[in-house]
Image (spheres, rainbow, N blue to C red):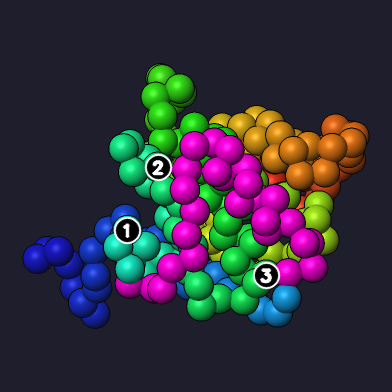
């Protein structure tokens, strides 16, 4: 930098590049309004069935902090979701946290895979978007920007996530509403899953 002329500039760190990409995609917008799915209680049952307790909690509470939701593994085995968001956002966040569990993000089941934070968040939010869309709740205002930010434009990452995303979304939808054909879910994923749109961009 000492050997350059012209206007001063900031060194392009990974954090700065990520912030720029997120701002160009727009910030995730919390979902407003009521949950049209009537699936919240069933999602909570699936979380509890996986061995986790579930709490609606105030922002800033232990583990949750300023996040919309959190899944804590180990000896705690707890999912917390903010209690001050719309019922639509509450459902979407709960599915996202269930996806972390079903994607084995808190276990050693996926040995050999690089499950860094960006990949885990990309998988969980993509699953949440597919499941919500299938249940007639459009989460694109939140999911698109969230996935774009965590995937950081990495097409290889998006491709690596696709198989897990579709498998887990199918499992959750089957548990919530037994009977949908795999082809229907595949068609929905092709048209609406955020990671698929990111790959096409």
Q: Residue 88 carries which label?
A: 3
Separation of marks 1 and 3 at Cα, in angstroms: 22 Å
Quadrant of the image containing the C terminus: bottom right
Q: Is residue 58 magenta?
A: yes
The residue identified by callout 2 is 77
Q: Is mark 1 on a helix, strand or loop?
A: loop
Q: Is residue 142 left or right of residue 138?
A: left
Looking at marks 1 and 3 on the same chain, the residue that comes earlier in the sequence is marked by 1
Q: Do the numbered discs 2 and 3 sit on residues whose CB atoms are within 8 Å?
A: no
The answer to which image quadrant residue 86 occupies is bottom right
28 w.r.t. 179: above or below: below
Residue at 49% of width from left, 32% of height from top?
Answer: 104
- The crowd level at tag 2 (other Cα within 10 Å; few <14, some 14-19, many 20+) is some
Q: Do the numbered discs 2 and 1 sit on residues whose CB atoms are within 8 Å?
A: no
Query: Magenta residues?
Result: 35-60
Looking at marks 2 and 1 on the same chain, the residue that comes earlier in the sequence is marked by 1
């Amino acid at each position: 930098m000492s050997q350059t002329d012209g206007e001063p500039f900031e060194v392009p760190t990974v954090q700065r590049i990520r912030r720029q990409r997120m701002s160009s995609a727009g910030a995730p917008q919390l979902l407003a309004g009521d949950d049209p799915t009537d699936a919240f209680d069933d999602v909570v049952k699936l979380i509890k069935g996986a061995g986790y307790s579930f709490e609606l909690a105030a922002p800033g509470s232990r583990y949750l902090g300023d996040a919309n939701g959190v899944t804590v593994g180990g000896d705690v085995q707890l999912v917390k979701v903010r209690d001050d968001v719309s019922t639509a956002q509450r459902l979407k966040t709960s599915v996202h946290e269930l996806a972390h569990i079903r994607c084995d993000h808190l276990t050693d089941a996926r040995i050999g895979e690089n499950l860094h934070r960006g990949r885990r968040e990309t998988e969980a939010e993509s699953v949440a978007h597919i499941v919500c869309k299938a249940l007639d709740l459009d989460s694109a205002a939140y999911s698109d920007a969230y996935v774009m930010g965590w995937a950081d434009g990495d097409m290889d990452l998006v491709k690596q996530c696709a198989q897990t995303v579709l498998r887990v979304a199918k499992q959750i939808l089957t548990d919530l509403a037994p009977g949908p054909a795999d082809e229907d879910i595949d068609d929905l994923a092709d048209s609406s899953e955020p990671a698929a749109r990111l790959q096409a961009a």
